[in-house]
Image: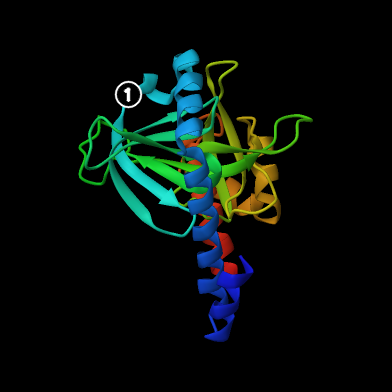
Amino acid sequence: MKAILLPLLAVGLAPAAWAQGSHAATEAALYRAANTPAAARQQRAELSLHAGEFLSNGTYQVGYLRLLGGRRVLVPGLRYHIGQRVVQAQDSLEADSTHYWPLAALRGFDLGTEDDVPPAGAPAVRRYRTRLVQESHQSPRPEAVEVLTATDAGPLLLGWLTQVASGGPMLVAGPGATGTEPLRPLELSEAAVLRLCGSRANDVQAFAASHHLRYDQPAEVAQLLDHYNRLAVAKF
C-alpha cells in the first residue's frame, strides 16, 4: 500500500480524490477476495443452503451497483442475500456467469432503473444503502436498508430493514450520512418521530398538521423527515 500512496502524495492529490482512491482500493480488494475460485465455491454453497433468505424471492432484477469509489454500474441482473449480506450480480457479457459483491464493498445498490414503469404507487427504483444498524443492545452492524426518504445522505434517513429471523421488515431511522452513528428502530408514533426531529419538532409537527400527514404511516413519516431535511439544510 505504501508504494501506491507515495506517488499519489508526490503529485499533490486533493483530499476528496485521495478518499475516493482509498475507497476504490478497498472495494477492489474485497471484490477480489470474494471471487477467488475457493471463495466463490463456498459462497455458492452457502447461498444454496439458505435460498429462502434472498430478497424478492431470489429473482434477478436489472439495477445498479453503487461502488465505494463513487461509481454507479448498471448490471443486467442482481439479487441480494440478506443472511450472507452479499449481492450476486450477473455478468454483462456472460449471462450464465455471476460475481459476488460483499455489502462491505458497496455504498449500496438499486433495484430497477429510471426507465421502468412501476405499479401504481411504487417507486421506479428501490434504493438500498449500506448503513450501520443497531437493534436493542446488539452491536451495530452493516445492513442493506431500503431508503424511503428523498435523499439517502441526510440529515435524517428513514428506511426498511428486511430481517431474516422475523421475515418482516423493520422501520429504522437516524443520521443519513454514512459514519459511526447507526440507524435504530423507529416506533410509528408522534412522540417517537418528533423526538427524532429534536429542536425542529415544532416545525415538523406544524407541517404534519397542515398537510394532514399521519405518524403511523411510513410513507407519510418519510414526507415529514423530508421536510425536516429541507429545514436542516436551509439553516446550514
Residue 93 located left or right of residue 146: left
Q: Nearer the viewer, residue 76 or 5?
A: 5
Residue 31 located left or right of residue 64: right
Q: Picture coordinates of residue 160 (x, y %)?
A: 52, 33
Q: Nearer the viewer, residue 118 or 211?
A: 118
**Residue wearing tag 1:** 59
Look at the image and name its color scheme: rainbow
Q: Residue at x 57, y 51 (%)?
A: 176
> Is 201 placed above or below 23 here?
above
Q: Picture coordinates of residue 153 (x, y %)?
A: 52, 55
Residue 143, located in which quarter of the rendered image? top right
Q: Nearer the viewer, residue 214 or 2?
A: 2
**Amino acid type of the residue tagged 1 in the rendering:** Thr
Q: Nearer the viewer, residue 15 or 3?
A: 3
Q: Is residue 224 visible?
A: no
Q: Residue at x 51, y 20 (%)?
A: 46
Q: Residue at x 57, y 31 (%)?
A: 171
Q: Picture coordinates of residue 184 (x, y %)?
A: 67, 37
- Mark 1 burial class by Cα count in 10 Å: few <14, some 14-19, many 20+: few
Q: Picture coordinates of residue 107 (x, y %)?
A: 49, 49
Q: Is residue 170 visible?
A: yes
Residue 161, located in which quarter of the rendered image? top right
